[in-house]
Image (cartoon, grey):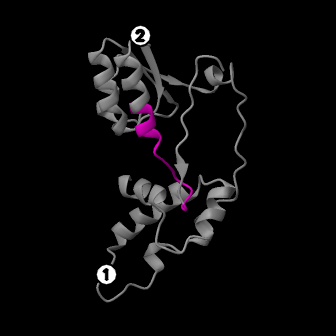
Amino acid sequence: MDHIKLRLGFVTGQKQQKGVDSLIVTDVIDLARNHAITDAVILSGDEDIRIGVQIAQSFGVRVHLIGIVPSRGSQSLNLLRESDTTMEWDIPIISKFLSVKAIAMTPPLVSAIPPVSTMASSPSITFDPVVAASIDKVIASIAGVLNSSEVTSLKGYTNGIPREFDGKMLAR
């Protein structure tokens, strides 16, 4: 599209995209410093973008932060506070300019994960039954919403819990 810049970083071996935030920050600062923009619309939630927002604002640029529903739980609170305006786009808004495809869900992965409460504990780790039940609920809530590519990715992962899932479980 005219007047739109999409920044794509690189994909790691764990299929995580990296480097996008620094590209966005660099672009916003350069454009602001050169008075090439009056407003920046950023679709992100990453805390690392905040410094670029602050510097752009020091050059008089208004920064508008967009998230996709449900974004409020994944956007940095400091980035939200720093931005001049914030909004969340939902499916009706997005479908005006993009086709929205439903994600085919696989059967829940929960059945493939033995409950923590039934796992044999190592000598150094013991689970209180209440804690074990809580852990089981967290795992079930995350595993129950995985799509087929995420399930396939997890099945091939042999080095602990992938970061994106570990972070979600720790947060809950």
Q: How many marks?
A: 2
- The residue mark sitting in front, 1 or 2, is 2
Q: As drawn, is 117 to the left or to the right of 17?
A: left
State whether residue 24 is above or below residue 58. below
Q: Compared with residue 60, is residue 125 higher up or lower down, i.e. above or below?
A: below
* Residue for point 26% across, 17% down: 58
Q: Secondary structure at mark 2?
A: loop
- Where residue 118 sits: x, y (%)? 47, 79
Q: Secondary structure at mark 1?
A: loop
Mark 1 is on which residue type? Ile
**Residue 57 drawn at (x, y percent):** 30, 17
Magenta-span inclusion, residue 43 = no
Q: Residues within 10 Å of mark 2 (few under 14, many from 20)?
A: some
Instruction: Give the residue number, with chain letter if any, for mark 1.
Output: 125
For the residue pair 96 and 115, the one nearer the viewer reads as 96
In magenta segment, residue 18: yes
Q: Do we see residue 73 in this rendering? A: no
Q: Is residue 171 visible?
A: yes
Residue drawn at point x = 69 percent, y = 26 percent: 98
Quarter of the view holding residue 114: bottom right
Q: Amino acid at mark 2?
A: Thr
In magenta, the rendered stretch is 13-25
Q: CA distance from mark 1 to mark 2?
A: 57 Å
State left or right for residue 3 relative to residue 39: right
What residue did someone put label 2 on?
Answer: 38
User: Which residue occupies the foreground of this view, 11 or 78?
Assistant: 11
Decide if residue 154 is on the left or right side of residue 95: left
